[in-house]
Image (cartoon, rainbow, N blue to C red):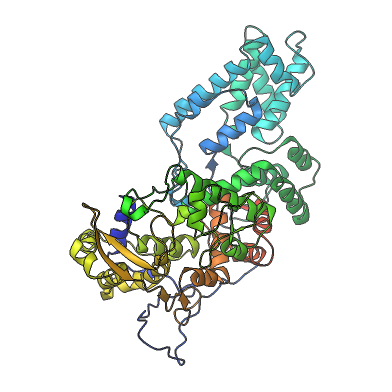
Amino acid sequence: MRPLTLTALLLAACTADIMSPPGEPSRPSPNDPTKPDDPADPGVAFALPVCDPSAGPLATELHRLTREELGATLGDLLGAGVDLSTWLSQLPAEDFSRGAESFDNRYTQLHTEVLLELALGAAGKVTATNATLDTLLRAHVSCTTANVTDTCARDFIRSFGRRAWRRPLTTAEADAVFAAYQTGIDARDRFSVAVAVVLMAPETLYHLELGTSGQGSDARFALSPYEVASRLSYGVLGTAPTRELLAAAEAGALGTPAEVEAAAASLLSSPRARARTQEFFAWWLGTSNTPGIPTNPGFLAGLDTVGLRAEMSRELNQYLDWVVWTKRGSYAELLESNVSFARTPALAAIHGHALGADPNDATQVMEPGRKGLFLRGPLLTSPDDFTHPLPRGARLRTQVLCDVLGIPSPEAFAAQNEAQAPAAVREASARVRYDQKTSALQCAGCHQSINPLGFALEGFDSAGRQRDVEVAYDQVSREVLAEHPLDLSVKNARIDRTKGEHADGASALIGLIAHSEKGPLCMARQLHRFYALRSEDTQVEACRLLEVKRALETGSIVDGLRIHAARWAATEKVVAQ
């Protein structure tokens, strides 16, 4: 039902802010493919933000660790064998459906109760026996339960606290934890108390950034080396800084842009950075839950769908890993490479190639007309035996080009039902039906930008296969109602200009996006939203966004990740007044 609902909503009246230069209202223009180009009216060009080095950073609020960050931090701190899932699973799952805007940064009463139980439970697990406590102690000090001294306990508190709080404890902080330690009745109990006190502290649970010195009335701070290390590590790896990164902070080796960038490059060589990148793409593309595959036997025409959904997801992830990390591809290569990693005959048939002897050797080439990231199964499929061109177009418009669409009206549901009625389906193609339903003036602001992108993808059915005609089925009897010719042409794709960008089909449209100004800038914006968990300001933060954009275009995705991580980690802290 989700694609149907989104289609219905997109049919509603709305307004758009898509091609206007910053600070100006939107400028909708007709999208009638029957009208010839007017050379005297080239339309409005998309205006890149302008880098102003004097623009100060935005105010940033205090952020708590997400459930995933907390789990990874405690796993590194206490050891992977310590199972904390009982408590972590009780923490509410974060909503990142709209990125930073939908992230609830508050700790509720439920959070507080679970976090207290988590700290006590984790401390109890690692001190449950002399053997488990000795394992923890050996990671920080030379003593064991057999020869614990107050000096050794203080050394442990300083070492363990440094890892948990991502900075050295002050003398007063270490003394306070030691005082709590002394309340225990025996060695295991004393260390359990000390561990629990450290874990339940705000320094563990929050991304505390206190800086080094205030500058002016706007409370603008330079981050400390330890805070730079923390931003780097949580951004790139999703967990607390390693011992090596904390040592670099202590040695003053994170004080220059070159040093921070080198540290970011080192972190990106970690397997955890690869996993984090897969998380980014799943969030960006919305592929965590791959849509189902149609079940209509007539539509499937013998296609073996057993395991197909999982194979599509696996192939997409392998493609991403290859193009980002093995090939070190650029933004354009991400969108345009024709390499396939299909391992099953069914997916190989969908991709239009024979199954190779070694599907992992990057020699399988997809059929003409299909390429890159967005023309793969998880981004094309739906459980229905008909396509959803409006959600397809809206995905490209909002997630890939970062354009803003207006808020739709519930009145669209009636229009959706009318467009899918058997009489309408029998009479005309999806393109004709949806164009008619969105032709009203109040709809044009959004749909002149949504529809063309979705219609260009109509050459792919809801199983992700290329097609030459649209076959319409009755949704009850599953009998064929009609066959309609496809019109995949796009006039005024409205990517970098409101007029003059034409494409004949999906492959040509993807080519326009791959070599546009807006596409790589949008990816730079999406990287910031995910890795910094903050919304961006394209004017105030233009310098960093444009630098990441250039890296994605002229270098590689990894270069863009490195530049973003380094620049964000070194950004000064501004406290809202």
- Determine if residue 532 is in view: no
Report the side of 284 relative to 78 (left or right).
left
Q: Closer to the camera, 246 or 323?
A: 323
Q: Quadrant of residue 76?
A: top right
Q: Position of residue 298 (x, y in %)?
A: 31, 54
Residue at 58 percent across and 29 percent down: it is 201
Q: In this view, does 511 lie above or below 104?
A: below
Residue furthest to the bottom in view is 40
Where is residue 434 shown, x and y percent of the image? 29, 68
Residue 17 percent coordinates (x, y): 41, 70
* Image x and y of residue 504, in percent: 46, 75
**Residue 77 visible, this orientation:** yes
In this rendered view, identify the residue nearer to me: 400 or 99: 400
Number of callouts: 0
**Residue extending furthest toward the left:** 423
Which one is in front, 550 or 339? 339
Q: In this view, does 100 lie to the left or right of 8?
A: right
Q: Quadrant of residue 337?
A: bottom right
| In-image side of 110 versus 263 (left or right) | left
Question: Compared with residue 250, is residue 280 higher up or lower down, i.e. above or below?
Answer: below
Residue at figure coordinates x 37%, y 60% from the top left? 391
